Structures are given as C-alpha cells and as structure tokens.
Amino acid sequence: MNMDIASDEMTLFRDMARRAFEQEIAPHFESWEEDHLVPREFWNTMGTAGLLCPDVDEAYGGAGTAPHVTLMLIEELSRMGFGGIATGYGIHSNIVAPYISRHGTEEQKQQWLPKMVSGEAFGALAMTEPGAGSDVQGIRTSAVRDGDEWVLNGSKIFITNGIHADIVVVAAITDPGKGAKGTSLLLVDTTLPGFEKSRKIEKIGQHTSDTAQLFFQDVRLPANALLGEENRGFVIMMEELPRERLGIAAQAVGAAEGALDITVDYVKERKAFGQSIGEFQNTRFKLADVKTQIGLSRALYEQCADEYAQGALTADKAAMLKLASCEMQCSTIDDCLQLFGGYGYTVEYPISRFYTDARIQRIYGGFIRNHARTGLRARCWGARALKQRVLLAGATGYIGSRVARELLTNDYDLICPVRDVSSEACDTLRAFASDCETGSLHLLAADLQDPENLDRALQEYRVDVLVSCIASRSGGVADSHQIDYLANHYLLQWAVKSEVKHFTLLSAICVQKPRLAFQFAKLRFESELAASGLSFSSVRATAFFKSLSGQLQRVSRGKPFLMFGDGTLTRCKPIAEADLAHFIRLTLESDALKGVQEIGGPGPAISPLEQAQLLSRLTGQPLRTKCVSPKLLRGIAALLDIPGRFSKGIADKAEFVRIGHYYATESMLHWDKDQEAYDADATPEFGTITLEDSYRAQLAGAGDQALGDQAVFR
Ligand SMILES: Cc1cc2nc3c(=O)[nH]c(=O)nc-3n(C[C@H](O)[C@H](O)[C@H](O)COP(=O)(O)OP(=O)(O)OC[C@H]3O[C@@H](n4cnc5c(N)ncnc54)[C@H](O)[C@@H]3O)c2cc1C
C-alpha cells in the first residue's frame, strides 16, 4: 500500500485496532457467534475508540484519514477470524458512510455522519429484494412523491446490519417504466412508522453479522431524504461499486492471511508418522502455493486501493479484484482446512469458521453487479462473451424504442434501419445512446419494404442477432400485409443470407385466436420463421400498460370509466413496457426462451371493471363507470364493410372498428384450445412492475408512460 498516503496513521490505527479488537471482541466472540448477533452497544464502543468511519472528513467528526485505514481495519477484523463483524463494519464504514459523504447534501452529512462516526447511528445498504438480487434492475420497492414527502413501499432481503441499523440507504423505483434509470436512493430513518425489521436470517457462516429482511409500508419520508439526484440511484450504486469491492477484497486478503497464520502454527505442532506434518514436502508445497496466491491478490488489492485514493480505480479493475481475491480466499482456506484433517471440520477449530465465513464472499457484492461491465464477462455470461451486434427493426416505434434503450444499457451494439434518420424519435435515441456509457447506436436510412434497398443499406454491416419490433400502425388490411408479414419476410431473407444467429420477433398474444388481418399476417410470418431453420423467439406479448392507461386522466377529472358490457367480458395480465423490453433482451441471452413465448406481466389478471376500481381507489374519486355495448362496434363495422368494398380508406376504418370489437370481447390471456377458454394461470408472468405501480407513478406526475391511443375513449 502506498505509504505516502497512509503510513503513520496506518501504524497508529493498526496498533489501536488490534488492542481494541483483542480487548472488546475476542473475550465475547464465541457467545456472540452463538447468539448470531453482536450487542448493539458494541458499535458504540467501536465509535468511542475512534475506529468507525475513520476516513470521514474531520468536519463531520471523522479522522479524515485515507480510505486505506478503513480498509486496513476490515483486514484486521478478518485476519483475527471475526469475519461476520468485518462484514457489518464494512457496510457501515466502507459503504454507507462513503455513500453519504460523496452524494449527500450538507444537511444530510451534518445529520448522519457524526452519529455514524460515534456509533450512535449504525448504517445499512438495502438493494436486494426477493426478486432482485444479481439483477438490481428488477427492484420493485417504490417511492412515490406525495406533496413534500416520499411514500415508500416494498421490502428488502439479506440486509447486513438490518437488525441494528438506524439509517438505511434504500434503492427504490421512483420512475416506473424507466428501469434502472428510474431508480433513486433514499436515506431511511428506521424509527419511522411503517418501517419493520424481520427476524434475523440464519446463515451457514458470518453469524456475528446480522442479516435481516426489511419491510416498508407507507413509510413517509421527507423530500430531503433523497440521496443524490432523483433517478440517479443506479448510477450512484455503480459509481460506489469499486469501493464496495475493495472492502470485500480487504476481507478476502485479511482472512486468507489469518487462516494461513493459524495453519502454519498447526502444522508445526501436529505430528504424523513420527514427524510434524509441516515437514512433509506436500505440506510445504501447499503452503508455499497458498502464500503465493495470497501475495498476488494482496499486490492487486493494494494497487487498487492506491488507485481508488487517487480517483483512478476503474469499475473493471475493481471487479477483477473482487473476483480474483474471493476465489483466492475460498480456495486457499480450503487448502488450509485440509491440513487440519478431521479437526478442521469441527467447530472447535477456528479454521472451520474461516471456511464457512468465506463462502458468501463470492455471492454478495453482486454477480452481474460485479462482472457485467468487465472484460471478465466471457466467464460469467456464457454466450455473451463478445459484444453482440443486433439489427433492431422498428427502433423508433413504441416498444422498439424501449428495446433499443434496454439493449444499449446492456452493452449491445445496435444497427437500426429507420425510415427517416432525422426524425425526432431518432434524435431521442441518439441522445439516450450518448448518455449511456455502454453499447453503441448506428441509425441508417433503409426501406424495410424494399429488399434491394435493405440489402444496400446493410451491406457493410455484420450482425449477430436480429430483433424485429415492427408492426403496422393502422392495423388496416393492406398495411398489415405490408408490415407485419412482408417487411418481416424481407428481414428474414436477409437474416438467413447473412447467417444471423437468432431472430426475435415481437408478436402478440392475440394471434392464438386470430380473426383480424394483422393477426393473420403475424401468424403467416411466424410460421415462415419457424420453418426457416434459424434459431428464433416469437414473443407473443399481452397488453402493455399504454393500452390500459388511456382513461387515467378521465377518471382523475371525475369522469366515468368507460367499459364494454359490464366490464368483466375480458381480462389480461398487463406488462410494463420496460419489463417487455427486458424479456426481449433475455431472448437473445437464454436458450430457454427460444421458440414461441407467450408472456404476461406480474399478474394477477385484471378486468376493465377491476381497472376502474383500482383507478377509483388511487385517484380518490368515487367509482363511476359507463357501459358501452360491444354490439355497437360490430354494427358499425358491418355498416362500413359495404362502402369499404370500394374504398381502401373505409375498409381500413372497418378493420379498425373490428379490432376495437376484438379487444372489447377477447381476453389477452393464454387460450386453452381444449377447454375453449382463456386461462389466466397458464399465462406466463414476467417482470416486476405492476399496473398499480405504474398508475401511482403517473398520478404522481412521474414515469414516461405514454397514454393510450384509445380514440374511442377520447
Ligand atoms: C450474508 C449476506 C449478506 C448480504 N448483504 C446485503 C446487503 O447488505 N445489502 C444488499 O442489498 N444485499 C445483500 N445481500 C444480497 C446479495 O448481494 C445477493 O444475494 C446477491 O446479489 C445475489 O442475489 P440473489 O441472492 O438474488 O441471487 P440470484 O440473482 O438469484 O442469482 C443466483 C445465481 O444465478 C446465477 N445468475 C444470476 N444472474 C445470472 C446471469 N444473468 N447470467 C448467468 N448467471 C446468472 C449466478 O450463478 C448467481 O450466483 C447479502 C446476501 C447475503 C447472503
């Protein structure tokens, strides 16, 4: 470690820490391990001894040291075999305090940092949820703005320090529909009404680190609880990952060194075949190997710590450090335990605790979170060893533009043939791509209905996979043939010729019971795609939120909710546009999602009447509905059919009315052919954002949810 940065203070703190840990932890450690908890006062004792958050600025009560000192304290705790305490300490001093120091307002720093230094306030970081671990983009906990307050709802799991925490940094969705870009961080005081902590979660190791589930039910937070800017939570979490990973590496290196020390002592004492086992050549080779492995990790760790202090540590390098040091920790401690023979497997010998404490190190700190943006991706992401080049057709359309953002955020290179490269939609995409640190975007002018033009436009491009999100705008008979069938047909021809590896088609769940021109066109293409021999996914999506949001403003203004029949003729499991885009991306990454894929949102199935009830509850307006007979639409379509024989425009209008009638009478659910009935349970669910989340956000003025083009309801 760079001694210029930390030499004197390092020695001072190390001596102080060793004495304090020997005195304050060692005598009680066994009983705390049995209790699976350290007493809360222990953290006050650490604060009084000046050992909490040493690198917090002096202005906020800290010692203003280099970050190396905090890392060294984590190392020492780990070396002494106090792995669980090292984790709790690291979350408080190495993660939560830096989050507040680096992203908090002056008021937040004044409010929390001095208390964190003294131990009066103990910190936790809550990202993980039952449905969002490695994939932090799946977070469902939401914070909705209500006047001067945020209202927090949701739950978190596996939260270190969850039981003792006084202040928790919580990641929550503040703008549903925007995925990671709609995530914010909130500083949550655990004494607020609606905040609940579960029992401790029992683990196989690190017993002194308390791990809990947290629940938030209408927790009202002041507006100034926001940590960093609104909707920048994901960016902040990414920015702070290098420090989190450094802390984990400090634990890994410290623990491995501690395990080696006790192993060297043991092999000197233990005799077998008339000599100490340390004299066997195998033991010496093994220990030399262990020492070398630790030395390599230590060298990288110290280099990274210096780079972090100088503001030069990259996310990639920190991820490599985390991966290498945690694997080193687990394998070297396993080798050490082996040298203890059967004694190593008993709880009486501390090496067994080093062993069980180590295992979690390769899990927390994230999986994708660690590796997604590193050169190590080949190892973790299987098929995505190299950047994938995607031809995305329909990138300026409603779902296509969301798929484009999803793919860019996840580091794909996009080639998007569009009608007009200077359109507003293209400008929006370009702006998104230039903000996005990952992926790349190439927009090129091409006519998808002209195969020669398409060939010319794409001749210089090599593409790995193709995603088609094109759909006719009007749903008219001719348009459906031109776009839903013919343009896709040309794309498929090009894909086969260009040896594209996979073709994902955005289809619709309603094609399973076809009656409309666009459904027949989609089905015709789908069967061509299946027969092409190309690997493919046809995503038969249910209704997305746009189509269910058209009446939100009507109802907010006190107008009745318009529905067909008694409002129970149909049901659907709507899906958020962001979740649908996520699913489409996964079809490029997972073999399990090949073939025809029906897909709905996170359920349960909802009828128009239930939507009306939901909107009434959320807007505070009394439930008012107005029923329209679907027969009316059938009558209009029949009337238009006659002049439609002579006019394409009128024929399209008739088809449009038929589409309205179809949606008024058919559910967007799996159709069970044998039972001749829709089956909500058999409609697969995907995603995390519920319709209620989306309505709430839209009512609070958040979200980028476009309102539905429901002309009949205007
Ligand atoms: C003791 C302990 C302490 C913790 N402390 C905290 C804390 O303080 N705060 C907090 O927010 N969280 C905490 N966590 C949660 C921890 O960060 C998560 O458990 C971790 O991110 C993994 O998430 P998961 O458990 O949901 O696993 P999943 O996301 O379900 O992943 C399981 C496995 O699936 C595989 N996998 C997942 N995605 C992919 C993919 N795209 N490609 C290939 N393989 C994949 C990997 O092998 C992965 O290990 C803690 C967990 C434990 C056990």
Image (cartoon, helix red, strand yellow):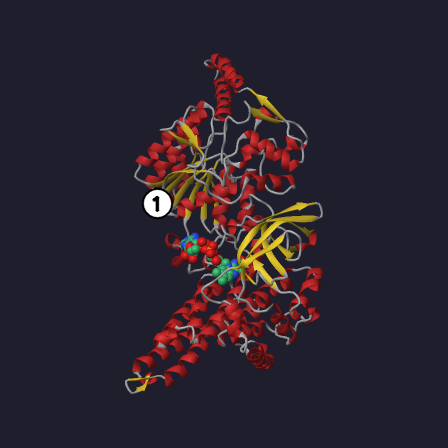
Which residue shows up at 65% across the image and 67% down it? 116
Residue in front for this viewpoint, 361 or 378: 361
- Residue sitting nearer the eye, 709 or 565: 565
Q: Position of residue 101 (x, y in %)?
A: 64, 64
Q: Would you identify the image quadrant in which residue 547 lies?
A: top right
- Image label count: 1
Residue 647 image position (x, y, % from top left): 48, 15
Q: Residue furthest left?
A: 273
Can you give x and y, in whole percent of width and height, for residue 307 in the image?
53, 70
Answer yes or no: disc 1 within 8 Å of ligand 1: no
Please state the horizontal and vertical placement of residue 499, each as a whole percent of the image.
Answer: 33, 43
Crowding near the residue tagged with mark 1, few <14, some 14–19, many ≥20 C-alpha atoms within 10 Å? some
Residue at 46%, 43% in the rendered image: 686
Above or below: residue 456 compared with residue 19: above
Q: Secondary structure at mark 1?
A: loop
Name the quadrant containing residue 344.
bottom left
Viewer-side residue, 674 vs 529:
674
Q: Residue at x 54, y 58 (%)?
A: 199
Q: Is residue 81 left or right of residue 190?
A: left
Indicate the amino acid at tag 1. Answer: Lys
What residue is pinned by disc 1? Answer: 501
**Is 714 located above or below residue 199 in the figure?**
above
- Measuring 43% from the left and 24% from the top, which residue is drawn there? 517
User: In the displayed structure, does residue 444 sit left or right of residue 220?
Assistant: left
Work out whether residue 336 can be spotted: no
Q: With respect to residue 373, does 57 lie above or below?
A: below
Quadrant of the frame with the C terminus: top right
